[in-house]
Image (cartoon, grey):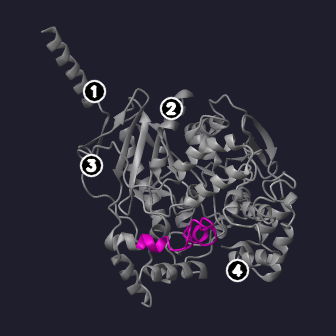
Amino acid sequence: MRLVLSSLLLSVLALNHVIAAPQVTLNSNEVISGIGDSQVESFKGIPFAEPPLGDLRFRAPVEYNHSYDGLKATSFGHTCLGVNPSGVLDLLNTLITLNPLNAALQQLVSPVQSLTNMVDLSEDCLFLNVYRPAGSKAGDKLPVMVWFFGGAFIFGSGSTYDGGKYVKASQRISQPVVVVTFNHRLGPFGYLGGSAVKAEGEGNPALLDQRLVLQWVQKHISQFGGDPDKVTLFGESAGGMNIFAQMAMYDGDNTYNGKPLFRGAIMQSGSLLPMETITDSRPQKLYHHFADAAGCSNLGDSDTMTCLRGKSTSTLSAAMNSWGLADGFGVMDMFITWSPRADGNILRDIPYKLVDAGKFAKVPYIIGNQNDEATLFAALLSWSSWSESQVQSLAQNLLFKSTESQRSQLLSLYPQDPSQGAPWGTGLLYSLGLGIQFKRIAGLLTDLLYHANRRRLLWSDNSIPRWNYLSKALSGLPYLGTTHANDLIWQWFLDLGPYRAYQEYFIAFANHLDPNVGVSLSNWPKYTNSDKKTLEIGFGTLGTTTDDFRNNKIQWMIDNPEAIAL
């Protein structure tokens, strides 16, 4: 009898455990359930938009218009269709072979695999995920951090990043937050350019996916214990660039129902890009290439879009992958074409012009870069046999609006001298294994894609509270140095090196709009145009430096924005 009673008791306890799954009520009476433990509760795979299929393909998202009642938000939604960047893993294997520090690189393999793993792909992918401290309830008014993932605008997903990591870190420093991650459309599904898209007025639907997420947060996050008045956006690479786009959309109007959608921003390795318009020759060329590969060639603009909307997902996926992207990561066309571009409606002008005119949301922000950002991209290309004339041809193709004189000036600033290239400060090291031009192009792209744009934004309005950082955490890593995206490893995957800096400063900023409040780390001075104080992040150290490196090179880019237009 005792055995029977014990079994019944265990069954009841197990049932109570199931019943005790965290729940949230949306829209007054629609109950969803998630999963949780003693520290974090999560609600995964919540749809925020109707599936962008059929006639909704390449258009603005339509708000989810079904009941949430009964939703078991216990697993992630599909990942948006993108380009599988297998070339990154191929590169890592190559560098491990070249590199005497195999063990140091080996520990990066698993996080990089996580970042580049594209599985469960679908066009029906507009889902978000909410993470909160266990026991949170409506009315707690916790600050909210919304994560924008990176991936060159052609791959990535919110599910890659465990928001519970930041929730736990926020509890560790007694500054609890709610974290939201989400998906948005990628590649041509989110950033298709060309005259046909312009004619429809449907440019940049990925930005509207993101905007719809922020509107969803305003409507619903209070039910999870979050405060819609304390939303901070944070993101890396393309994520940081998308955050700047959210700041610049509609000439800087970041309001919804008369209230700001966010009050702060954190842009890691990305802000504005030197992009031209949606109808320039590069997006127009890629539009035709994509349409031709999908079997929609030789049609008028309207008929071409109708044709593309009628194609199967597999056909469009094959068309999107028809450039051999494993060779070079698509840097020369994909990364710089399928991205936010001025469309005259959502983004009303070229990014640098919006910045110079002050047409962006003037919210406090954190911004920063890795010291050797573009070594990763340069290494993905084969420079071993490149001649000077080939480099000049590359510059002409890449900087399609520059004059011959401007290209000559730019290349003279970045000469074929490995001691003046990236990884910076490494002399003649690493100039053989990947070719004599590798460090030169790595240096040029580091400044063109990242540092020049960061400085343009920082210098545009001295009244905005802002903090700048520069990471040199992997300065001893052969070939790559402190390359692009290494910060994600410490932020989200390995509790090593600078992980506390990326977590605790950012969490404090989300709570107080000041990264120094309530953290036991080095004081991070505000950036001003007069002193340019910058936090320098080492692998296990924090210090202060000045943002004045390579002044003549970077200033040339700032002074000649049309020459570096992409």
Under circle 4, the secondary element is loop
User: Which residue is identified by label 1?
Assistant: 17
First to last magenta residue range? 316-342
Under circle 1, the secondary element is helix
User: Which residue is identified by label 3?
Assistant: 68
The residue positioned 66% from the left and 70% from the top of the image is 353
Q: Earlier in the sequence, mark 1 or mark 4?
A: 1
Measured as percent of width and height from the top left, residue 18 is found at: 26, 30
Q: Label 1, label 4: how many angstroms apart (C-alpha)?
A: 63 Å
Q: Nearer the viewer, mark 2 or mark 3?
A: 2
**Left or right of residue 408, residue 112 in this image:** left
Q: Are marks 4 and 3 in contact (CB under 8 Å)?
A: no
User: Which residue is identified by label 2?
Assistant: 168
Name the residue nearer the viewer: 427 or 186: 427
Q: Earlier in the sequence, mark 1 or mark 2?
A: 1
User: Which residue is identified by label 4?
Assistant: 401
Instruction: Answer with the quarter of the image where residue 34 lies.
Output: top left
